[in-house]
Image: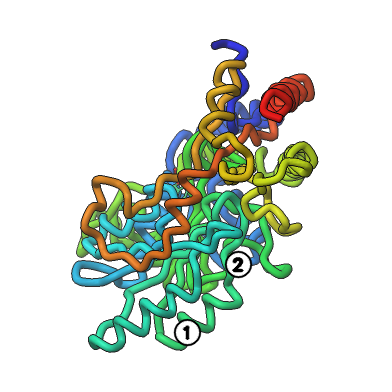
Amino acid sequence: MTDQILLSPPDVGVLEETYLVEALRSGWVAPAGPSVTAFEQEIAERCGVAHAVATSSGTAALHLALMALGVGTGDLVAVPTLTFAATANAVAYTGAEPVFVDVDPHTGNIDPELLATLCTELERTGRRLGAVLPVDLYGRCADYDELLPLCDRYGVPVIEDAAEALGSTYRGRPAGSLGRAAVLSFNGNKIMTTSGGGMLLSDDAALADRCRYLSTQARQPVAHYEHVDIGYNYRLSNLLAALGRAQLQRLDGMIARRRTLRDGYAKLFAATDGVRLLGADDAGANCWLTSIVVDPTRTGWTAADLAGHLTGTSIETRPVFKPMHLQPVFAGARTTLSGVAQQLFEQGLTLPSGSALTDPAVRKVIDSITGFLEGRR
Ligand SMILES: *Cc1c(COP(=O)(O)O)cnc(C)c1O
């Protein structure tokens, strides 16, 4: 197992070590300090937003954004059904109810037409969404040219779940700048990592201030401990912020590496009828994860067949996210479905995409897939 090739392992080295040790020696071993402040400024600049609040996770940032926008019990929040559970869990934390909306077959991102249908249906019953939470799936931005005017028309705030999309752009605009608020994740498997962490982004100073306040136990600005709200312990450690600053310096290089891997997969499958890359024709994507979609009626083999072969050669793969509306925990949730997310789940396979993959590791993956394809021809 030791030389198993992993899907998206952390990519850290000497620079990260230097920054981390420096922060440790500075004495700021706390969820506050100069590295946190600098990291927030650098991320805000990178994402083209005025304010950033570093958090202990992306999930915490989602929770804060929803609370700051006043989402709570009795509200409905639209979430693409094809996402990681954190997006829907954060909605549940507030007491609101997620409504799972199906996705575009080409990108796997929330389908604006289905969202429009949902908004119209709710309007007919005198209801309105508390928020819409588009996810930039696997690093490709959702269709904001459609989503933002639509949400504007219904007066619904957009929270961009850009947890997977740091460094991506949408028509030249950075991921993280596309909604009223946005969320990043620095979990260990993401495009860059602080081992665990996240960030809340917004141009709205009052919203960012509210999130910062709630993330620090809702302490009033007085000498003694005074509280008028329930608060949360959601701040990022100064040590981890230092790690994040080192990673941010290397972000463009890590994105370029992931794009090279994606281009390699595109070339590898180009001649195979019935295999396509999920949403990969986007020069603005950060290429966080590359997934293929396999139509077994054309290939004669399934995504699971290829996964089995790769597992047999010590190469990690993963199915595309299991849709939220198919998760036991969300059984009975409201939905607006087309069947696309379920099909992507059944036919999709995510391939090793990490920037830390060495050339020999990449060659091993390519050779293994080539061997599989030749055997099936
Ligand atoms: C990773 C992820 C999150 C959660 O981020 P954490 O930092 O792991 O809490 C939220 N949404 C999506 C789409 C993610 O991929």
* Quarter containing the C terminus: top right
Left or right for 217, reference 51: left
Distance, label 2 to label 1, CA atoms, is: 20 Å
What residue sits right under mark 1 in the picture? 152
The front one of 244 and 31 is 244
Element on which disc 1 rests: helix
What residue sits right under mark 2 in the picture? 49
- CB at mark 1 closer than 8 A to ligand 1? no
Residue count near mark 2 (Cα–Cα under 10 Å), binned few <14, some 14–19, many ≥20: many
Q: Amino acid at mark 2?
A: Val
Left or right for 289, reference 231: right
For residue 340, above or below residue 272: below
Element on which disc 2 rests: loop
Q: Residue at x 68, y 55 (%)?
A: 285
Quadrant of the rendered structure where residue 336 is?
bottom left
Q: Which of the two labelled residues, at mark 2 and mark 1, occupies the earlier sequence position?
A: 2
The picture places residue 128, in percent across and down from the top left corner, at 31, 81
Q: Nearer the viewer, mark 2 or mark 1?
A: 1
Camera sees residue 274: yes
Q: Residue at x 55, y 50 (%)?
A: 164
